[in-house]
Image: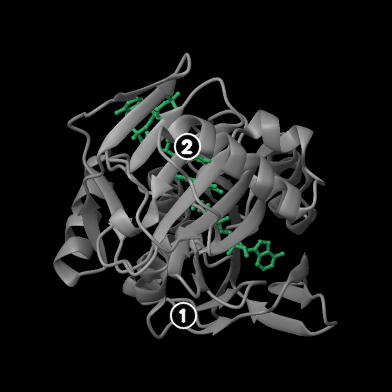
């Protein structure tokens, strides 16, 4: 059985697009919405004079068979490539090589390439912040921040971070309460570009006992612009919380200082630097919900916070939302 009305999907991160693709493949019309100007959410990339910079998700791993299979398809289509960084660990003031066998994937030529390709020609309203989701006598309707109404829709899938999902689920208090119970931690990200290559072999580093949590040589990822030596630094959730409202220039200065202390080579002034604050970067703890659903009413919530807090979890959660919706239609 097919629905005549489209299914509204709020959020064009990987969870929303995972659900959209599965529903579209099953013959159901979808209509996507995102408050941003493009797709990707936390898997987006920032265009800059130093090329595209992955400020959010750095790479992803695939452990679940279903995700392994889809990543192989993405690889065959050229949407993703394996990233094999020279990995290090910084612990107790020591920088040590930390190679492993883990396969790590990145979007190619930038992280945002994956959701751009998944979106394809699916209908989407960008720069459209949904503020209200409500049910009429039979169907769902959306209200956006500019006062426009959208609908009717047969079903709604909310695919935003938990704190942003909760108000959109207010017509089903049980779902709104579950989403509200998931705190999400922030992450400050800083990108740097140096005119000459830093004299280090480090291409990725897991960091302990520092304001930094992770750093990556962006240009070591496949397909990236290599003219400048580009780096992305992520602060720990703890440091970010303590400095949530610090001006971007000061955040850059602090994290550049921490980077210079640990990287073990001379660090000149960067030719370009930028900072980005991810307010809802990761769920404070993992859940095993898969999806939140009220199938009788036709409303679903998905995203990384319903599973592992990683790219893989977000994709699986979107699949689960689509599966539950299709199951209920039968
Ligand atoms: C700094 C950082 C580093 C990370 N590193 C990794 C990593 O290395 N590996 C890994 O696996 N994962 C990593 N992650 C986590 C990974 O990025 C996420 O798990 C995944 O991208 C979440 O996808 P999602 O679709 O659930 O949510 P999102 O990507 O957040 O998508 C939600 C979308 O909803 C939109 N939206 C929100 N509210 C509204 C509204 N009211 N109306 C319309 N649209 C709305 C947003 O604009 C966004 O596009 C990282 C995340 C961050 C922030
Ligand atoms: N900053 C955020 O907001 C945010 C960061 N996230 C990070 O995303 C990756 C994804 O995790 P995944 O399980 O897919 O990858 P890994 O297996 O590569 O890493 C998992 C953790 O394991 C430790 N690790 C892995 N490899 C090594 C290594 N070669 N040497 C030392 N340590 C390694 C490391 O843990 P610690 O940082 O040392 O505690 C990895 O973190 C992951 O890095 C998340 O932190 C996800 C969501 C938001």
- Point 73% across, 54% down: residue: 248
* Residue shown at the point (77%, 83%) measured from the top left: 149
146 to 322, vertically: above or below: below
Q: Earlier in the sequence, mark 2 or mark 1?
A: 1
Dot 1: within a 10 Å radius of its alpha carbon, few (fewer than 14), some, or many (20 or more) residues? Answer: many
**Is the residue at mark 2 in contact range of ligand 2, meaning its CB lies under 8 Å from it?**
yes
Quarter of the image for residue 138 reads bottom right
Identity of the residue drawn at 25% across and 39% down: 86
Figure coloring: one colour
- Residue beneath label 1, please? 29
Find residue 115 and report its horizontal and vertical position in percent. 41, 68
Counting other residues with Cα less than 10 Å from the Cα at mark 2, is it few (<14), some (14-19), or many (20 or more)? many
User: What is the quadrant of the C terminus in the image?
Assistant: bottom left
Relative to 163, 48 lies left or right: left
Label disc, if present, on residue 214 of the rendered structure:
2
Is disc 1 placed on a helix, strand or loop? loop
Q: Is residue 79 above or below residue 269?
A: below
- Asked if 35 appears above or below 75 in the picture, the reply is below
* Residue situated furthest top in the rendering: 92
Q: Position of residue 228 (x, y in %)?
A: 39, 65
The residue lying furthest to the left in this view is: 76
Name the residue furthest right.
147
Nearer mark to the viewer, of 2 and 1:
2
Q: Position of residue 116 (x, y in %)?
A: 40, 74
- Element type where label 2 sits in the image: strand
Residue 21 visible in the snapshot:
yes
Instruction: State the residue in front, 236 or 314.
Output: 236
Taking the spot 52% from the left edge, 56% from the top edge, the residue there is 192
């Amino acid at each position: 059985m097919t629905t005549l009305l489209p299914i509204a999907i709020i959020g064009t991160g990987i969870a929303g697009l995972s659900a959209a693709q599965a529903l579209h493949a099953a013959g159901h019309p979808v209509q996507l919405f995102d408050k941003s100007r493009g797709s990707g959410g936390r898997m987006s990339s920032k265009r800059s004079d130093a090329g595209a910079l992955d400020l959010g998700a750095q790479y992803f791993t695939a452990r679940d068979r279903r995700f392994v299979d889809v990543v192989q398809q993405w690889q065959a289509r050229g949407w993703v490539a394996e990233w094999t960084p020279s990995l290090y660990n910084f612990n107790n003031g020591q920088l040590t090589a930390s190679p492993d066998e883990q396969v790590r994937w990145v979007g190619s030529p930038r992280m945002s390439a994956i959701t751009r390709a998944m979106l394809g020609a699916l209908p989407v309203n960008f720069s459209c912040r949904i503020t209200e989701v409500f049910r009429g006598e039979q169907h769902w309707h959306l209200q956006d921040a500019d006062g426009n109404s959208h609908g009717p829709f047969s079903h709604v899938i909310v695919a935003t971070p938990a704190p942003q999902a909760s108000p959109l689920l207010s017509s089903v208090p049980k779902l709104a309460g579950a989403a509200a119970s998931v705190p999400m931690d922030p992450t400050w990200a800083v990108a740097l570009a140096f005119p000459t290559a830093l004299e280090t072999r480090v291409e990725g580093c897991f960091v302990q006992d520092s304001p930094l949590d992770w750093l990556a040589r962006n240009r070591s990822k496949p397909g990236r612009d290599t003219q400048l030596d580009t780096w992305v630094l992520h602060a720990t959730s703890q440091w970010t919380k303590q400095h949530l409202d610090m001006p971007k220039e000061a955040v850059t200065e602090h994290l550049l200082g921490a980077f210079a202390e640990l990287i073990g080579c001379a660090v000149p002034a960067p030719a370009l630097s930028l900072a980005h604050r991810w307010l809802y970067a990761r769920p404070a703890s993992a859940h095993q919900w898969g999806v939140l659903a009220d199938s009788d009413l036709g409303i679903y919530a998905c995203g990384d916070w319903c599973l592992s807090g990683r790219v893989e979890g977000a994709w699986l959660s979107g699949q689960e939302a689509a599966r539950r919706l299709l199951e209920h239609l039968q």
